[in-house]
Amino acid sequence: MKRLTSDAMLFRSRGSIDSGKVSFIELFFDLIFVFAVTQLSHSFLKNFTLEGALQLGVLTMAIWWVWIFTAWVMNWLNPETSRVRFMLIALMLIGLIMSSSLPEAFEESGIYFACAYTLFQVGRTAYTVWVLQKGSTELRINFIRILSWLSLSGIFWIAGGIAHEDNRLLLWCIALFIEYLSPSMGFWTPKLGRTPTTVWDVEGSHMAERCGLFIIIALGESILVTGATFAELEWDLLTLSSFAAAFVSSVVMWWIYFNMTAKTGHHFIAHSEDPGRVARSAYTYTHLLLVAGIILSAVADELVLAHPTGHMELKTALVILAGPALYLLGNMLFMRIAAGVISAPYLVGIIALVVLFPTYSFISPLLLSVLSAVILIGVAVWGSAHTDRICQAKTLPGQHKTESH
């Protein structure tokens, strides 16, 4: 009886008041990703080229994927048990090695990053399969399927880490393609078939809070970069203006997600007949765009702080506008998947940023940053006025409606 009780305790409860609560060990685990996001933005600043942008994209996708897969695992496992806590602590150690190798991942540290990443993904999934021996058979088979896909992609991660730098990008892109394709394929595996989304018994409030906390991590890194850069500069009107624009942008990004997107998404997932399908698409994929947008915005803030006036290069303008545009696109796609609506505030905000782009050749970086912030403020004010109405309408995910007021 004690054995059965111990096994039962390994799984997160469902339906109780505290079932969706994020534990302290999960918050502690997330500290590794604060470091990882900081490493990503700093690496891009050091290699501010098209090649650097491609590398940033690959590494950002990898870091997000390793985190979101762990978030899915923790949606089922109970973090208050010793075995689960030890797993997270072991993953933290591996994650610290993985994050430390990010700046040189496409140079001499490639093999260290590849090994740490693969061990993180494969090791965590294999451990979950072992833990689920006393749990749901369907869920255990699902993780066996996941383990098969991650083991396949791990071959390309390791091969890329060993390969010459010119081939590394290609091999790692193949690895990411395999991993990002797998959920949409239901992790189909020969003889085992595919997993229906109904098997993913999602605790919606936990998944929503976990993804919200990762957005906080990314926004916190943005503020950290802005504050550190600002502290090292001589304070004058231009520097203070650049700092103010960066701070306002971070606050508005927080407002857009937590006062609009997250609230609406949680409402519709809670009322969905198939929360696993909605959570898979809405959280697993779209939040990558949010994180990428925040990272690019942090890079843009540092560039504007360093050079608020003068001639602006094309790549600087692209980063200043691409960050908010990706962020709004991620929010818009999330709303489309979760609520079945195409939110006009997000769409108009993206269009406004695109229209603003041709002006970069005759305005300063600071002015472009300020105008970008103004657009975000407009989206926040307009969008907040309609969020409650969208929730009250209880639009089903299958319906297509454009919010145009």
Image (cartoon, rainbow, N blue to C red):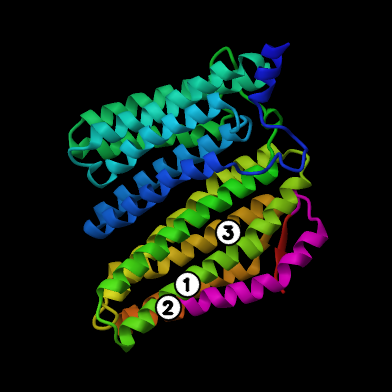
Residue at point 72%, 47% (across, down): 269
Q: Where is residue 381? Give x, y as percent.
A: 63, 76
- Say whether disc 3 or disc 1 marks the residue closer to the N-terminus: 1
Residue at point 47%, 45% (across, down): 30
Name the secondary structure under disc 3.
helix
Figure quadrant of the N terminus:
top right
User: Which three-letter amino acid code belongs to the residue tagged 2?
Assistant: Ala
Q: Label 1, on which residue?
A: 249
User: Which three-letter amino acid code belongs to the residue tagged 1?
Assistant: Ser
Q: Where is residue 333? Give x, y as percent.
A: 59, 55
Inter-mark Cα distance, 3 to 1: 15 Å
Q: Main secondary structure of the magenta part?
A: helix
Q: Label 3, on which residue?
A: 331
Task: From the viewer's perspective, tell me whether residue 273 is left or right of residue 302.
Answer: right
Residue at point 24%, 83% (across, down): 310
Q: Residue 318: tell me if it is visible.
A: no
Discs 2, 1 touching: Cβ within 8 Å: yes
Inter-mark Cα distance, 2 to 1: 6 Å
Q: Is residue 47 magenta?
A: no
Task: From the viewer's perspective, tell me whether residue 335 is left or right of residue 390.
Answer: left
Q: Where is residue 93? Give x, y as percent.
A: 37, 34
Q: Residue furthest right?
A: 393
Closer to the camera, 267 or 197? 267
User: Which three-letter amino acid code belongs to the residue tagged 3?
Assistant: Asn
Q: Label 2, on which residue?
A: 245
Name the secondary structure under disc 1.
helix
Q: Where is residue 365? Give x, y as percent.
A: 32, 78
- Say whether disc 2 or disc 3 marks the residue closer to the N-terminus: 2
Relative to 195, say whether 43 is above or below. Answer: below
Residue at point 56%, 48% (across, down): 211
Q: Residue 10: tell me if it is visible.
A: yes
Q: Which residues are magenta?
A: 373-399
